[in-house]
Amino acid sequence: MKPHVLVSRRVFPEIVARLREHFEVETNDADEVWPRAELIRRLQGKAGVFVTSSEPMDADLLAACPDLKAVCSMAVGYNNIDVAACTKRGVLASNAPGVLTETTADLGFALMMAAARRVSESERFLRRGEWTRWAVDMFAGSDVHGATLGILGMGRIGQAIARRGALGFSMPVVYHNRSRLDPAVEAELGARYVSKDVLLRESDHIVIVVPYSPSSHHLIGAAELSMMKPTATLTNIARGGLVDDAALAEALRDKRIGAAGLDVFEGEPTVHPGLLEASNIVLTPHIGSASLPTRRAMANLAVDNLIATLGSGASRRVPPTALNPEVLGRLSAS
Ligand code: DGY
């Protein structure tokens, strides 16, 4: 008997086909966002679940789904998964780091450049038919090349952004992170470790790539925004809730900072009305990792983790990107 797994959102057909080689699979072809009770109902009798970044996998849900042994996400961010609760219940949890690094860094850089050079704002102006003549300061923004790039959070994606800035655009890079990088990596990136306050004061363009947790909630609020240069840009490609969206909307409205580029929002897919009204902003709907090859690689990595955890015979092995590999001993004994 093959174990049963649930795929919580629509995924690529080849991903489902791969899963069917090992499991009895229930899919969500309509791509409905199942309400919690519905998700719990569908998880009864399932040994594994393939999730994205939006389905909360918390202690109460785990308690209501006693057959669950593996929660495998195709996202790198896993603030929707209570890893400690998974570990307590002997459930293997995994995310999908590495495969989306460069693609997400590309979007971060694109948003930063678009914010600095007022790309969306000027396109909206053109589409409204308001472009009737040239003016010396028309949509004059700020330079990216040679400007100081400040990176909050210097994990894989932060480093990929630093590399683009330092090597491609001659940007001096400053960063702030929980821990300092190895000096050899700092030297390769030309990156200087600074306090958060120094980063806020010195940077021309700030990119946030910090994982969300209660301790990083509103990492950027009114106080931090007031420390930024009035011409600086702020880009968030990490998670909603890291920035106080209401405070950012006010700072943009009052032109206390130059511009913002946002891919993630508090309470998304709802977006704060003040951000929608702001002119000096570039908004994208959480598409940081959205290139087709990358989305396929992310989904395949979640499948690798499910097969490694729940597959039979030789296919069972240490899951490549487990968040709590310590539960494996308990799983193989069960
Ligand atoms: C991730 O993988 O965490 C991206 O933000 C997509 O959710």
Image (cartoon, rainbow, N blue to C red):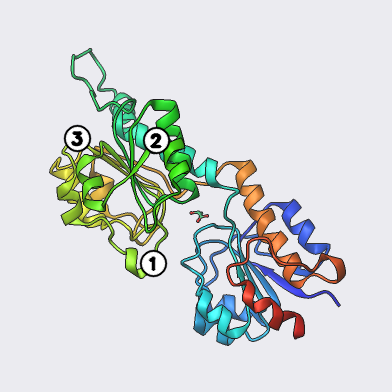
Q: Nearer the viewer, residue 75 or 173?
A: 173
Q: Amino acid at mark 1?
A: Ser
What residue appears at the point 28 percent right and 27 percent down from the top-left corner?
125
Answer above or below: position of 87 versus 272: below
Label of residue 213 in the image: 1
Label of residue 190 in the image: 2
Answer above or below: position of 148 versus 18: above
What residue appears at the point 21 percent right and 20 percent down from the top-left corner?
138
Q: Is residue 111 visible?
A: yes
Disc 3 and disc 2 in contact, CB within 8 angstroms: no
Q: Amino acid at mark 2?
A: Gly
- Quarter of image, res 189: top left
- Quarter of image, res 11: bottom right
Q: x%, y% of residue 182?
A: 45, 48
**Label 3 or label 2, whichever comes before in sequence order:** 2
Nearer the viewer's eye, disc 2 or disc 1?
2
Nearer the viewer's eye, disc 3 or disc 2?
2
Q: Amino acid at mark 3?
A: Thr
What residue appears at the point 29 percent right and 34 percent down from the top-left corner?
148
Q: x%, y% of residue 46?
A: 70, 78
What residue appears at the point 35 percent right and 36 percent down from the top-left corner?
112
10 Å neighbourhood of mark 3: few (<14), some, or many (≥20)?
A: some
Secondary structure beneath dot 2 equals: loop
Quick check: 214 left or right of 41?
left
Quick check: 27 left or right of 97?
right
Residue assigned mark 3: 231
**Label 3 or label 1, whichever comes before in sequence order:** 1
Q: CA distance from mark 2 to mark 1?
A: 29 Å
Q: x%, y% of residue 137?
A: 18, 19
